[in-house]
Image (cartoon, rainbow, N blue to C red):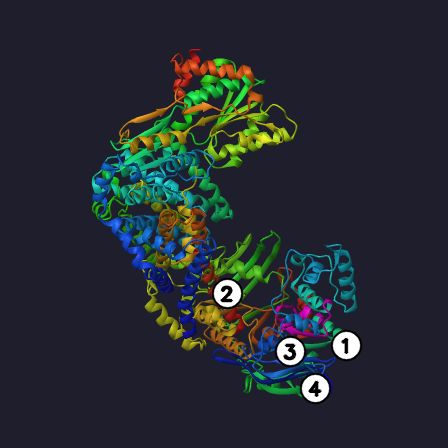
Amino acid sequence: MRRVLFLLTLVLTLGIFLAACGSSDEGGDSEDSGGDTGSQEEGSGSEGESGGDFSVAMVTDTGGVDDKSFNQSAWEGLQAFGEAQGLEEGEGFDYAQSESDADYTTNLNRLVREEYDLIFGIGFLLQPDVEKVASQFPETNFALVDAVAEGDNVASITFKEHQGSFLAGVAAAHKTQSNHIGFVGGVDSELINKFESGFRAGAKTVNPDIQIDVQYAESFNSADQGKLIASNMYSQGADVIYHAAGGTGNGVFSEAKDRVRGGEEEVWVIGVDRDQHDEGQINDQNVALTSMVKRVDIAVQDVSTQAMEGEFPGGEVVEYGLEDDGVSLARTNEEALGDEIISAIEEWKQKIIDGEVEVPQTREGAEEYISSL
Amino acid sequence: MFSNRTFNIVVPLISVVLGLLAGALIMLAFGYNPVAGYAAMWNGAFGDAYFLGETVRQVTPYVLSGLAVAFAMRAGLLNIGVEGQVIVGWLAAVWVGTAFGMPPVVHVIVALLAAAVAGSLWGFVPGLLKAKLGVHEVIVTIMMNYIALYLSNSIIRSLMTDGSDRTDNVAETASLAAPWLREITFFSRIHYGFVVALLMAFTMWFVLNKTTRGFELRAVGSNPFASEYSGMKVGRNIIIAMVISGGFAGLAGAMEGLGTFQYASVSSGFTNIGFDGIAVALLGANTAIGVVLAAILFGTLKIGALNMPTEAGVPTELVDIVIALIILFVASGYIIRWAFLKFSKEGK
Amino acid sequence: MDYVIEMLNIRKEFPGIVANDDITLQVQKGEIHALLGENGAGKSTLMNVLFGLYKPEKGSIKVNGKEVNIEDPNVANELGIGMVHQHFMLVDTFTVTENIVLGSEPSKAGTVDIKAAEKEVQALSEKYGLNVDATAKIRDISVGMQQRVEILKTLYRGAEILILDEPTAVLTPQEIKELIQIMQDLVKEGKSIILITHKLKEIMQVCDKCTIIRKGKGIGTVDVNETNPTELASLMVGREVNFKTDKTPGSPTETALSIKDLRVKDSRGVEMVKGLNLDVRKGEILGIAGVDGNGQTELVEALTGLKKSSSGQVSLNNNSIYNLEPRKVTEAGVAHIPQDRHKHGLLLDFPIGENMVLQNYYMEPNSKNGILNFKKIYEKARSLIKEYDVRTPDEYTKARALSGGNQQKAIIAREVDRSPDLLIAAQPTRGLDVGAIEFIHSKLIEERDKQRAVLLVSFELDEIMNVSDRIAVMFDGQIIAEVKPEETDEQELGLLMAGRKSEKRGEA
């Protein structure tokens, strides 16, 4: 009984707050949520011409906009776009943060209701949600980062991570002194398998006898797991570890730095998504050999601009690769890389762009590629 | 008697108001308008049919995971394993939903039963270990959570799909989706699961309060020694409590698998439905009706909070703090009551 | 007159009740002053007022002639008032010294100087003849020792006035004797003691003065030398009280319970019942006398199915009940009033009405097809509450809210109502006041007169002597003697309980 009362109280209290602000806030709100799918149709059609009315928003995955990884990168891209167009945050561009997998759809819907012209879903986890919501609101444009979604009003933005990872493999194979390197993946999934396959192919290309440890942490945000795995790999002789594990990768960095602190000289990490040079700094050394950079920010800006100009690539898969600098290998740590490795990277980069090398994207592909070497 | 009744009304009232006030103060302190903030929360939860539908959708699994925790608690067991039981229930429901073809109503019922059985099985193991060997259920259930998570990931990846991260959608016949409800709520993901949840809340109330089995379960929870003295089999009741609790949890998973998502996917972390269920059960004082109401509060806060950054500009972190404060105050209201009753009892 | 403590015209109210009404208590230096009253009369409330836990509505408190305002227990401590509660407040896993210094630890450079404290505690213990090992862990020492630790704790804090709340309720006869000695030593050293009790014998034995309260009102203070137990009892209860239980001799017939060579181990695997033989006949009360810890608990648990026996035979009316499950034992016709009514006897958080069907909730008419029939359950409870005079607001009140005596009455109502062939009563009057004890004894005799077998286990010699038709003395897991109450005395029983076999009736 008292629970009934207590809920009643909650509702009443909220009601009071509402009443207080009712006339100003509520009025405006209920209107735009109710029957506005109609007005929106006209909106997105005409807005291509007049840039000032164009609005764009994104839904993060559970990492949030400060994940030091692709959510952050995407948000930076959106901010840059907004600034360039003179838009205001909350009006012309905005983001909605997801606390759990169940929130994706709700957030996408909310942004649709707020009449954004283009809505980004950041991360492959949002694929089913973007697909579904896009089919329900055919007049709004959507873009999905890192995965392919069906729908005429959906642009899929993917990256040739396997290409960048291939170069990471080349760098690692040149750098290692023990002929033993490692790969730490986040969750064993199609996307992360692309990283793994490219990396292995690149390393084996340089040195077919190299030993490559591969392990998945089954999580993108457990640094402790990452540290543990890295510790095992280093102890067993690996000296370069490439991580594609988001927050889990922070543990790989911290293990490498601990080892440097303990007097070990040759331990290296290859970062992912952003240039993780800052993560690798310890005293005057840096364990970040390089990073496989994915320019989500460029992609987001790019697609936003296209949409604003009425050239939204709906129904298409926009792929960013080495040729358009959508993926690249960071060179911040020139000291560690050295001229030899840099020129090797350049060489293979050119071969990939020229189509001389077809970098595998799956494990099966990688096995095939390696056995053909 | 009278003062006690007034007390029952006043305490939750005060604690909710205090929680909202504390949240408002925090928002003020950081320079945000609390009125706008709470208005955004209200709109985000009940503002229109879509959000109402989403709120109901969010409340549904909370009711069931709350019931799971509450049921075990009434028998004196702290089932931290609801999370894992949710995961296996989810997986089992989706498996039945994708792998078999059955007539419409039958299919969804079989899928729900499969979820309940899977959850029960996950509850049975810690129950058995507790009853026979005295192993504390908290430790076992925590470990079972991890087994559930990684086992389910690996089954999805290698058995249910060919290395993919996500299963196919469940067949139409196994879906809990309620198209007409979705239509009137502008494509919210509301589904028939709330009927299941309410039915289960009634079931829990009936079993615990009306049956001899429920009497034994509550007796064992209240005083295992006196229960043994009066000829009840303590061990068997522990196992039964964990099995039923796991069944509720499994159904909570089915709500997600057959209702909200319609598929199961490889997950890098827990769903938190089970863990939130602990708070729901606590707020609901481990009673069926209490759990339903607490789940409504939780679901409302969760869904409403998503709207606060976009509509009122309150940053997500602050929203989390505000939500936590509200829950904290409501929960401590419960503690204050408990302390007061204890104090007044000793004062006699 | 120089009083160390004067509580004058104290009045303390709780919502709906006046717990203390115009009570005056004056304690002289160096005396043992009894505070006598039935359970719920207001003794504990009065002492909590003195100890600063409650604030009185009216009245004043003087310590050594000066009026004081005792706001909280810390003030009481400073004034030299120390309290030993009925339920000990000790940390099980700490040592004696650690418990004693808890809250006022002597420190040396920021760390607790436990060695110095140990010495001090040991010295105190010797001074008052407490014989406590300062380094022992609380969980390793007996209840009697723990009580002494509580006393030491108050002394360590400089108490001059000690309040002992029902100190003998948890002690064996031997320990009671030692406690009395300790109290006398303390008084000799100039301390004053307030003894809260409802046991008249103890008052007559050690106290100088006795203040009686009844239903919250002060009845007066008497000089113990000038009174007798009968007068004290009638002052306490407010009417004439029978001490010697009225009972006609029983007329036992054939054997009901037969135990042969029973062996039982306790939870640690130590054999506590070592080949015990015993018969109880229909129509008799067999009392088992003995000091706690000689296997009585294990015997009762084995008979009722709560503990598995390792070997032997037990039969009731020639049907074996050896190692049956508790429910089967119950269904075979055994009723059990458990030694610890809170642990085993009741579901304290359940309504008293539901507690009354604890043994037969699963049978018709209380339930049918697994569904409880609360209407029938509470109907039955109402009639039992009336018949057994259980004082409770109603049958929906939680068992926890009832007084000890009424809880016990409820248990007896439940157990006796099933018309058992054998009634096992373990410590049935522990912690109860005179009125309740009278009631319970008369019920046991009533059952006997219905030709049922009654097995009474008690550590109170008076109870054994007054109620039993036959006494079996249990020592070290065996029955070492059987005597008739009219043919023995406390002296002989005491020796038997200590393991010395009587020359006259010596047997294995």
Q: Residue C13's spot in the image, x, y percent?
A: 53, 80
- Mark 3 and mark 1 residues within 8 Å of each other at the beta carbon: no
What is the spatial separation of the Cα atoms under label 3 and label 1, in whole angstroms? 24 Å
Mark 3: few/some/many CA within 10 Å (<14, 14-19, 20+): some
Q: Residue C176's spot in the image, x, y percent?
A: 68, 71
The amino acid at mark 4 is Asn
What is the spatial separation of the Cα atoms under label 1 and label 4, in whole angstroms? 21 Å
Residue B89 disc label: none
Whichever of callouts 1 and 4 sits on the residue coming sooner in the sequence is 1
Element at label 2:
helix
What is the spatial separation of the Cα atoms under label 4 and label 2, in whole angstroms? 46 Å
Tell me, yes or no, if residue C493 can be seen here: no
Mark 4: few/some/many CA within 10 Å (<14, 14-19, 20+): few
In the image, taking residue C473 as reference, residue A202 lies left or right, namely left
Residue B339 disc label: 2
* Residue that numbered label 1 is attached to: C190
Give the residues drawn in magenta, as a range.
C156-178
